[in-house]
């Protein structure tokens, strides 16, 4: 599962009051540029459909604090089907690695219908995912949605993101729906998430801009909280997803 040649990066997470994040964002803006995809509004919307197996292994790995773990998700931006990304995120302690490939709306529809097959014309990662669907019964578990303000710097291949309004939804077939989803927040009111990702080193000027002496690193999983704070609770979603995902077929 964890290839030795896979590239891992540092990832640190901080759950902070919004007023503290606003201050950090203003300091960063003085010398870091925002991601080119944000457009005029300065942020973009992310929706991720997370998958788990029949035994909820990915969820239970989070609960148990397993050091080596992974997640599968399909991600869309700004409620659009123009770019759909299949992603496998792997973690070793505070190090993360992400493999991804673009899939078409037609492939996404076949995944939801459980009617997609391995093919030489598929991206290799998609074939790995299809194999996991067939052997481990990977199925949609929850949607996580939030608004991201991203900053990037070449030094250290650094990326700093502010994720706000993080919420979960059980509308498992509505990832690409151009409308608000029925959802609920996963953090306390007034709290949001800061993530810092970098390669071998974090540039000092970025570290100083972020650190005020009061921020505390968190062990934080959007997927875990979305499963916990959801209308269906933390139990396995496979039975619940039966009518939406045609598990009876």
Image: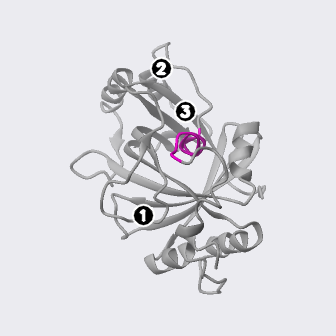
Q: CA distance from mark 3 to mark 1?
A: 28 Å
Provide residue 124's location: percent of width, then percent of height: 65, 75
Query: Going by the image, does 237 lie left or right of 212?
Result: right
Q: CA distance from mark 1 to mark 2?
A: 38 Å
Residue 40 included in the magenta stretch of the image: no
How many badges with numbers are in the image? Answer: 3
Residue 153 in view of the camera? no
Q: Which residue is mark 1?
A: 174
How packed is label 2: few (under 14 Cα within 10 Å), some, or many (20 or more)?
few
Q: Quadrant of residue 33?
A: top left
Prevailing secondary structure class for the magenta stretch in the rendered image = helix
**Identity of the residue drawn at 31% across and 46% down:** 43
Provide residue 139's location: percent of width, then percent of height: 63, 64
The tag earlier along the polypeptide, 1 or 2, is: 1
The kind of secondary structure element at disc 3 is strand
The tag earlier along the polypeptide, 3 or 2, is: 3
Which region is colored magenta?
A: 221-231
The kind of secondary structure element at disc 2 is loop
Which of the two discs, 1 and 2, sits closer to the camera?
Answer: 1
**Identity of the residue drawn at 71% across and 38% down:** 63
Give yes or no for contact between labels 3 and 1 (Cβ–Cβ under 8 Å): no
**Identity of the residue drawn at 58% across and 25% down:** 217
The one of 154 and 128 positioned closer to us in this rendering: 128
Q: Which residue is mark 2?
A: 211
Query: Going by the image, does 52 lie left or right of 20?
Result: right
Q: Which residue extends farthest bottom?
A: 120
Provide residue 232's location: percent of width, then percent of height: 56, 48
Residue 220 in view of the camera? yes
The tag earlier along the polypeptide, 3 or 1, is: 3
Residue 229 included in the magenta stretch of the image: yes
Q: Which residue is mark 3?
A: 13
């Amino acid at each position: 599962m964890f290839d030795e040649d896979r590239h891992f990066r540092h990832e640190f997470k901080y759950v902070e009051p919004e007023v503290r994040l606003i201050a950090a964002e203003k300091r960063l803006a003085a010398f870091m540029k925002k991601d080119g995809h944000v457009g005029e509004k300065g942020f973009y919307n992310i929706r991720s459909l997370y998958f788990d197996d029949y035994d909820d292994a990915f969820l239970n790995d989070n609960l148990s604090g397993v050091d080596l773990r992974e997640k599968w998700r399909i991600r869309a931006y700004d409620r659009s089907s123009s770019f759909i990304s299949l992603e496998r995120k792997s973690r070793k302690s505070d190090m993360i690695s992400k493999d991804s490939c673009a899939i078409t709306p037609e492939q996404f529809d076949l995944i939801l219908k459980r009617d997609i097959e391995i093919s030489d014309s598929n991206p290799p990662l998609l074939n790995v995912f299809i194999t996991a669907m067939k052997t481990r019964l990977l199925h949609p578990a929850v949607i996580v949605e939030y608004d991201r303000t991203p900053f990037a710097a070449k030094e250290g291949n650094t990326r700093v993101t502010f994720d706000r309004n993080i919420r979960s939804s059980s509308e498992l077939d509505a990832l690409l729906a151009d409308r608000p989803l029925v959802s609920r927040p996963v953090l306390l009111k007034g709290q949001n998430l800061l993530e810092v990702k970098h390669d071998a080193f974090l540039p000092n000027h970025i570290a100083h801009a972020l650190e005020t002496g009061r921020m505390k690193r968190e062990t934080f999983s959007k997927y875990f909280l979305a499963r916990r704070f959801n209308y269906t609770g933390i139990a396995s979603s496979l039975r619940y997803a039966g009518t939406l995902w045609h598990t009876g077929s």
